[in-house]
Image (tube, rainbow, N blue to C red):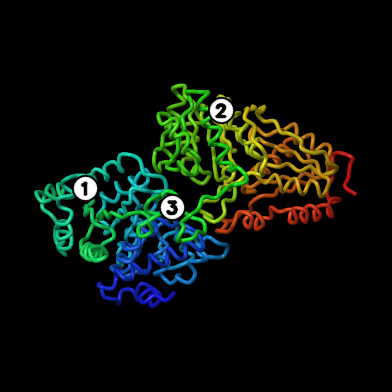
Amino acid sequence: MKYEFLDKINNPSDLRILSINNLDDVSEELRYFLIETVSQCGGHFGASLGAVELTVAIHYSFNTPQDKIIWDVGHQCYGHKVLTGRKNELNTIRKKEGLHPFPSIEESEYDSFGVGHSSTSISAAIGMAIASSYKNEDKKIVAVIGDGGLSAGMAFEALNHMGSINEDILVILNDNEMSISPNVGAMTNYLTKILSSKVYSTVKEGSKTILSKVPTSGMFLTKTEKHIKGLLAPGMLFEEMGINYYGPIDGHDTRLLVKTLKNLKKIQGPKLLHVITKKGKGYLPAESDPVKYHAVPVFDRDKGVEKKSNTKITYTKVFDNWLCTMAKKDPRVFAITPAMREGSGLVNFSKEFPERYIDVGIAEQHSVTLAAGLACEGQKPIVCIYSTFLQRAYDQLIHDVALQNLDVLFAVDRAGFVGADGGTHCGLYDLSYLRCIPNMVIMAPSNEEECKNMLYTGHLHNGPAVVRYPRGEGIGINVKEEFYSYKIGRSIKVRDGIKIAIMNFGSVFNVSLEVANELDCTLIDMRFIKPIDTKAIIDAAENHNLIVTIEDNSIIGGAGSAVNEVLNENNFKIPTINIGAPDKFFNHATREEQLIESGISKSNIIKKIEKCIKNINLYDFNHSSNIE
């Protein structure tokens, strides 16, 4: 399709030569292009549609890339990618060797800061502003953060610092009442109160005139006028922090946005512009169901996203079913999530047990310590969290839970490779960063049935426990209704073989089984990473000539390292091959492509084993059997 304006915009300088009267047309074309393209390639959808006018206005008003725009999280940045020279590549987004799913400094000079996790933009902006002042550079620094991002402590820490210094920083609060799940917390309630107030409704139109005539120099408001401003737009929370507050204004009024931004450019010091947008704007299904349309697969733009009928149950659904059943049996069960109700499988629980469902917003640290407090009072809290988000609460995990040996269960979703969201969301490090913490019990299921039983085992265990499971479907086995508790630290032998023992950890079991069948290997489903089954490892070392460990975690410090430690401690010199993620960050691709890239495939593992067998005579074994 031909676009009158969009086809002529190869970078923001092309946009800035247009008349302000053309910007509505640019926005309309950009929104249509996003709907057409994302419906054919999939990706983050609703937030980018809602930020179209804001994106156009920012690039029109600021001299990017010299002026720095930091997008928080990056769900809203598809329009930004289009306007900064990546229009023809947008259909490759989240695919192997295609565009990054979020802003990436290696992809474009217009991506000022790489993101993926929430609430980092203001901190990064402060650092850039301080550096700019130190170097006497004339550049503007803008952080664009969603209202959901303000629920994180890191954002408040940054605002607190920002208000205490006199750096020239603009924070744009893109308020659409949504992050991924509906926003929760005092900040959301505060913003909602602003929008629903009679005062705001009365002066909404008048505020446009006021804000479009912001003085270009000097003090913006006297002390008396600040109180009046508080009545017009109740932003006194930010004012009390030392940050000049402006708004709220209509985030879909391009002309108003441009005039306001250009005026705010001329005002020095820390300031916050409150912009009201609608997630999914311009596409009715996305407006009606912003959760469903936050990130979408390929879909028919006329019919919308159709519900997929899964033939296999997902691990997240296994957790959902187990949690609701367990909550009926045990009134002490609480489920805690840092703003990931849908992703972590908590929708049903939140409806059935609202009094025991706690969504803390994007506040991972708080979620863990809150669970510790519940455990202190005899409850059975379950922290439902992605592997990559648990990293953000590492100190709380050690200091507040493990050190006190508190009874908290962590249901860690999206462990291992996660595919299209790329390096920021890969859960490749949890075994490494959890294994070194005392008092922890760590489990990794190889199938759906084990996942359910491990959750039950963790629930019965009196102390901190982790069950880490992957994104997506299981292998397709039937999950029984009854629960079974595993003996802590005990593995299970799946098949007997000769000379080679394979130790499988978690969801790569199918690959391990294929290799074991091909080479007639002993296969052990280890189940527990900590405490690890020392007896099974010693037995394998005494009766085999080669040990192979397979996991979907970083090789460094992972489950294979735990096996190596046991062998070393017991003076075994048996050759060992550790298969897992190498020491690198993985870009976006399918999960299967990421596994192959890391060498976790039948053919690659067999090649490594055959290479080792050729050199087996280099080793001195303390038992008599040898590979022929």
Q: The residue under label 3 is which amino acid type? A: His
Q: Quadrant of the N terminus?
A: bottom left
How dense is the environment of label 3, judged by Cα within 10 Å: few (below 14), some, or many (20 and up)?
A: many
Chain-order first, disc 2 or disc 3: 3
Query: Which label was assigned to residue 459?
Result: 2
Mark 1 and mark 2 in contact? Answer it, CB < 8 Å. no
Residue designated by label 3: 294
Give x and y (percent) for residue 621: 84, 42
Q: The residue under label 1 is which amino acid type? A: Gly
Q: Nearer the viewer, residue 383 or 306?
A: 306
**Residue drawn where x is 21% and y is 53% of the image:** 244
Mark 2–mark 3 Cα distance, whole angstroms, equals 32 Å
Q: The residue under label 2 is which amino acid type? A: His
Element on which disc 1 rests: loop
Residue designated by label 1: 235
Name above or below for residue 134 compared with residue 438: below
Is residue 499 shown left or right of residue 225?
right
Element on which disc 2 rests: helix
Element on which disc 3 rests: loop
